[in-house]
Image (cartoon, helix red, strand yellow):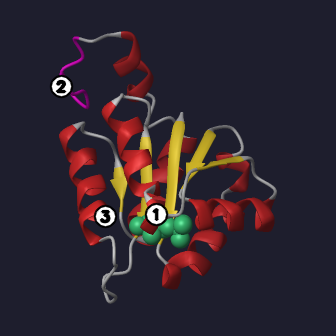
Amino acid sequence: MKIALIAHDRKKELMMKLAEAYKHIFEKHELFATGTTGLLIHKNTGLAVHCFKSGPLGGDQQIGAMISDDKMDLVIFLRDPLAAQPHEPDVTALIRLCDVYEIPLATNIGTAEVLVRGLEIGLLDFREVVHENENTPLGYSTK
Ligand SMILES: O=C(CO)COP(=O)(O)O
């Protein structure tokens, strides 16, 4: 599975804890991240992460492009609801694209843990079916 990991500054520590705690799961998948988040995850856990540009410099949009190309299966975006972001339109656009393409999305650690644990026990396997069969009615976008 292709997984995007993104965290705003005040959520980065939490993202590191998530990456460390579930390293045994993440290491079985292909990880993508916005620049600073990805670098920190790699440094802290040793996990291989494809790093895009930093969020404010277009990283959210690069991940959005992967979503619109149907090349992302899960997005964990620990956003900061208490701080205004200079690139708020990009943040909104990324979340919107997850909804347009029906991509599982966690925007807080509670949901993130549910999705990662679900990943481990195969609850996201339907995404594989999605790639194989364009007629899958659920969890698949025809856009
Ligand atoms: O701003 C971000 C997402 O909107 C995160 O970007 P960084 O991982 O580069 O800090």
Mark 3 Cα-neighbour bin, 10 Å: few <14, some 14–19, many ≥20:
some
Q: Of label 1 and label 3, which has the lower sequence position?
A: 1
Where is residue 26? Give x, y as percent: 65, 48
Nearer the observer: mark 1 or 3; the answer is 1
Report whether the residue tagged 3 is closer than 8 Å to ligand 1.
yes
The relative height of residue 57 versus residue 104 in the rendered view (above or below) is: below
User: Which numbered disc covers residue 57?
Assistant: 1
In which image quadrant can residue 94 be found? bottom left
Nearer the observer: mark 2 or 1; the answer is 1
Where is residue 31? Give x, y as percent: 61, 45
The residue sitting at 44% across, 22% down in the picture is 128
User: Is 58 left or right of 100, judged from the image as shown?
Assistant: right
Report whether the residue tagged 2 is closer than 8 Å to ligand 1.
no
Q: CA distance from mark 2 to mark 1?
A: 27 Å
Mark 1 Cα-neighbour bin, 10 Å: few <14, some 14–19, many ≥20:
some
Q: Which residue is mark 3?
A: 91
The kind of residue tagged 2 is Lys
